[in-house]
């Protein structure tokens, strides 16, 4: 009798273990199905502004014109100091923190501290576009990672007096970004190369303007 009871107890324990395993497997399958459904219902597609020649679009794939516009918007905003860089630079970093990577945010804060020590924040600053977008301004440097080249006019004033008015070359790296606070799906990750003056580009633009007037 003891052996029979032990056998029945062992069988019942085995059945109970199988039931728990089945419930766990069902729960895991349901969770995976839910995750897959959410992914399918929240697809981000970056549509280029010009579709006249058609386009092959893949979910999450960044488009070069959009990437340029994004980098231009963010970088111009970070350098918009309408009152004084002492307050405006910090406000700009906070405003655009979800559109830049944490690493670039740290670099900008370090740059702000350096400029403060050097007395380079007591001024207004504005960036304007010097050369408009061209196809060669954006290039692939990795999987869905782009280098964005921009030529912009940098102007700084102190007390209404212009102290700097130069054309600059900027080369920014743009990467995919899936943080919840970033609805754009991309972020500026820093410089590809350090900014430089763009005398050559500015001179060519000036020549074209003079030729159009004549």
Image (cartoon, rainbow, N blue to C red):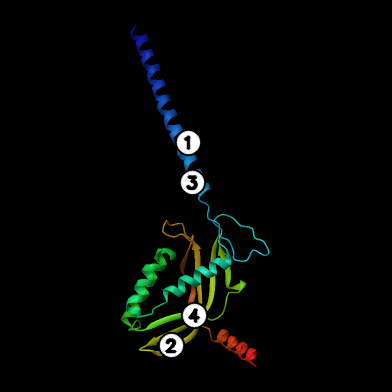
* Mark closer to the chain start, 4 or 2: 4
Q: Read off the residue under disc 2.
A: 164
Quadrant of the image occupied by residue 100: bottom left
* Mark closer to the chain start, 1 or 4: 1
Q: Nearer the viewer, mark 4 or mark 2?
A: 4
* Mark closer to the chain start, 4 or 3: 3
Q: Nearer the viewer, mark 1 or mark 4?
A: 4
Residue lying furthest top in this view?
1
Residue at 40% in and 27% down:
20
Q: CA distance from mark 1 to mark 3?
A: 14 Å
Q: CA distance from mark 2 to mark 3?
A: 51 Å
Would you call the spot at circle 1 few (<14 residues within 10 Å), some (14-19), or many (20 or more)?
A: few
Q: Are marks 4 and 3 in contact (CB under 8 Å)?
A: no
Q: Is residue 191 visible?
A: no
Q: CA distance from mark 1 to mark 4?
A: 54 Å
Name the secondary structure under disc 4: strand
Residue 67 rendering spot, x and y as whole percentages: 54, 66
Residue at 55% in and 86% down:
202
Q: Are marks 1 and 4 in contact (CB under 8 Å)?
A: no
Q: Is residue 24 visible?
A: yes
Marker disc for residue 88: none
Work out whether 36 lies above or below 92: above
Q: How many marks?
A: 4
Residue 124 rendering spot, x and y as whole percentages: 38, 82
Q: CA distance from mark 2 to mark 1?
A: 63 Å
Would you call the spot at circle 4 few (<14 residues within 10 Å), some (14-19), or many (20 or more)?
A: some
Q: Read off the residue under disc 1.
A: 29
Q: Are marks 1 and 3 in contact (CB under 8 Å)?
A: no
Name the secondary structure under disc 2: strand
* Mark closer to the chain start, 1 or 3: 1
Would you call the spot at circle 3 few (<14 residues within 10 Å), some (14-19), or many (20 or more)?
A: few
């Amino acid at each position: 009798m003891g052996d029979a009871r032990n056998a029945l107890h062992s069988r019942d324990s085995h059945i109970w273990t199988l039931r728990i395993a089945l419930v766990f497997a069902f729960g895991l399958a349901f969770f995976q199905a839910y995750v897959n459904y959410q992914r399918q219902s929240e697809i981000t597609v970056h549509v280029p502004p010009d579709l006249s020649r058609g386009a092959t679009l893949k979910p999450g794939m960044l488009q070069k014109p959009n990437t340029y516009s994004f980098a231009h918007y963010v970088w111009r905003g970070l350098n918009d100091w309408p009152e004084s860089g002492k307050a405006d630079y910090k406000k700009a970093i906070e405003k655009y923190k979800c559109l830049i990577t944490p690493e670039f945010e740290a670099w900008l804060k370090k740059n702000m501290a350096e400029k403060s020590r050097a007395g380079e924040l007591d001024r207004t600053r504005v960036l304007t576009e010097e050369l408009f977008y061209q196809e060669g301004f954006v290039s692939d440097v990795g999987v869905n990672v782009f280098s964005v080249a921009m030529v912009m006019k940098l102007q700084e004033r102190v007390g209404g007096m212009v102290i700097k008015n130069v054309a600059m070359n900027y080369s920014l790296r743009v990467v995919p970004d899936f943080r919840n606070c970033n609805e754009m799906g991309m972020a500026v990750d820093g410089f590809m190369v350090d900014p430089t003056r763009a005398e050559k580009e500015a001179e060519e633009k000036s020549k074209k303007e003079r030729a159009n007037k004549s």
